[in-house]
Image (cartoon, rainbow, N blue to C red):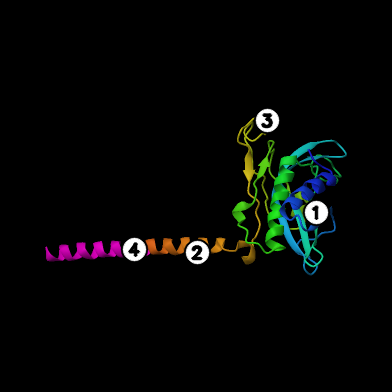
Amino acid sequence: MIGTMEIWQQIFSQKIGQMKPGDTWTLKADYNLQSNDLDPGWKQFLQQHAFARFQCSQCWHIWHSAQVNILFHMHLDRKQRRGQAKMKIFRQECKKCLVPKLELPEFSQENVERVLENLMLKIRGKCYREAISPNNLSKIIVEAQIMGPHDSSHCEACRLGICYVKYEVQAPANTFFRTASLFPRSFPAHEEWSEAEMGSSRNVGSRCDWRCCCCYICCLVIFLAVLIFVLLYLKTK
């Protein structure tokens, strides 16, 4: 499991270097970040439903959650070709301790990779103004059994009004473990997408809606024609 910022930074550097080799980007932790409180020119991405492992620093109790939130703020200086990304991982408390502390989670490398792949997409869409489809977002893998409901009273993101999930999705025993199942459960990354990021993908959806409307209208016309024919036939009888 990954708990150190250095690993996040190493994977981030690899991915951003492959995506935008001509620009220089940095990633750092900033626990003063606030949701929707952005400096001019900065963009935001909130990764929801990330899966991680927590351990209490007082009683050593271990628990897992699939409702971990990670807040990213991103900025690109186009003239300098330099970008900055800041991240804040929201913490949870141990519910066994009388005076619990907020604890930072640990992530598997696979889920760190998936979260940062989603961040790459958001950087491309928000900072480079590329047309990105929300269907390209990587899904988060649930790698262990979730015990009990999501406890919003011990969730930092819930207290701040960022985490809207009140109940943890239950994982039946031996179904979604990485070591026990070939098909671990996955959650999509939920995030609002702007018009610029959606690009032409919205046009595809519009064409589909238009075709559906035409089908409904044709069916309605055929139904009315058959009904009129039947009524006229009965009247002549």
Q: Secondary structure at mark 2?
A: helix
Which quadrant is the N terminus positioned in? top right
Residue 219 in the magenta stretch? The answer is yes
Type of residue at label 1?
Lys
Q: Position of residue 178 (x, y in %)?
A: 67, 34
Asked where in the image residue 39 lies, by quadrant, the reply is bottom right
Label 4 or label 2, whichever comes before in sequence order: 2
Q: Residue at x 82, y 48 (%)?
A: 9
Asked where in the image residue 59 lies, by quadrant, the reply is top right
Magenta segment, prevailing SS (helix, strand or loop)? helix
Q: Residues within 10 Å of mark 3 (few under 14, many from 20)?
A: few
Q: Residue at x 65, y 48 (%)?
A: 138
Work out how far the residue at label 2 is from the one at label 3, CA to CA, in angstroms: 42 Å
Work out how far the residue at label 4 is from the one at label 2, CA to CA, in angstroms: 19 Å
Label 1 or label 2, whichever comes before in sequence order: 1
Mark 4 and mark 3 residues within 8 Å of each other at the beta carbon: no
Q: Secondary structure at mark 4?
A: helix
